[in-house]
Image: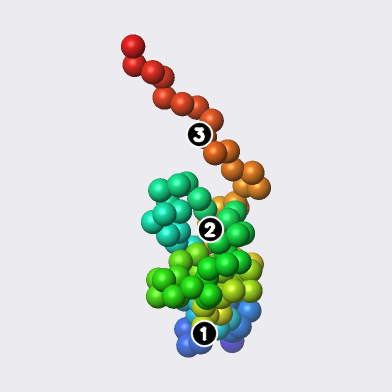
Amino acid sequence: SMPSAMPSSMPSPTDATTIVSPRSNDCIICDDEETPWMIDNEHDCTNFDYLINTMCNKDTYWNNNKFCRLSCYNAGNGYAGDVCCTGLEIETRAPIPICVPTEPPTRPPEIE
């Protein structure tokens, strides 16, 4: 008989790239939530190295809220116990552009 293409019992480790689960390859899907101040000032976890290097697991407020969890982990300042998926295992979001304009490219027309 032919081996089944879709195993029903346990997925093999090679299937980890296609299965979206919080624990593929023993890593967890970490979000990248900005602090309220960062949101108000249009800062992003992925391009604010100063905060990522000085806050993250070095700051109580950040520790309690796990702000910028993925960026902190990627910078080597991850929160205790975190093993974040780095995005190479699973594509969870669109690629981040290298330069981000501070102003939106098109401004709404002024109402006369």
* Up-down relation of residue 2 to residue 89 (above or below): below
Cα distance, mark 3 to mark 2? 18 Å
Where is residue 28? Give x, y as percent. Answer: 51, 77
- Is disc 2 surrounded by few (<14), some (14 to 19) or many (20+) residues within 10 Å? many
- Is disc 3 surrounded by few (<14), some (14 to 19) or many (20+) residues within 10 Å? few
Q: Pick whichever, 85 or 46, lies toward us.
A: 46
Residue where numbered disc 3 is placed: 104
What amino acid does circle 2 point to?
Cys
- Is disc 1 surrounded by few (<14), some (14 to 19) or many (20+) residues within 10 Å? few
Q: Quick one: SS at disc 2?
A: helix
Residue where numbered disc 1 is placed: 81
Left or right side of 11 for 108: left
Cα distance, mark 2 to mark 1? 20 Å
Q: Residue at x 57, y 67 (%)?
A: 54
| Among the two numbered marks 2 and 1 on one chain, the one whose residue lies closer to the N terminus | 2
Cα distance, mark 1 to mark 3? 38 Å
Image color mode = rainbow
- The quarter of the picture where residue 34 lies is bottom left
Where is residue 59? Give x, y as percent. Answer: 48, 73
Q: Pick whichever, 14 or 92, lies toward us.
A: 92
Q: Residue at x 42, y 59 (%)?
A: 35
Q: Residue at x 38, y 18 (%)?
A: 110
Q: Residue at x 33, y 11 (%)?
A: 112
Where is residue 25? Give x, y as percent. Answer: 58, 81
| Among the two numbered marks 1 and 3 on one chain, the one whose residue lies closer to the N terminus | 1
Left or right side of 32 for 49: right
- The quarter of the picture where residue 86 lies is bottom right
Q: Pick whichever, 54 or 23, lies toward us.
A: 54
What amino acid does circle 3 point to?
Pro
Q: Pick whichever, 84 or 57, lies toward us.
A: 57
| Among the two numbered marks 3 and 2 on one chain, the one whose residue lies closer to the N terminus | 2
Residue where numbered disc 2 is placed: 45
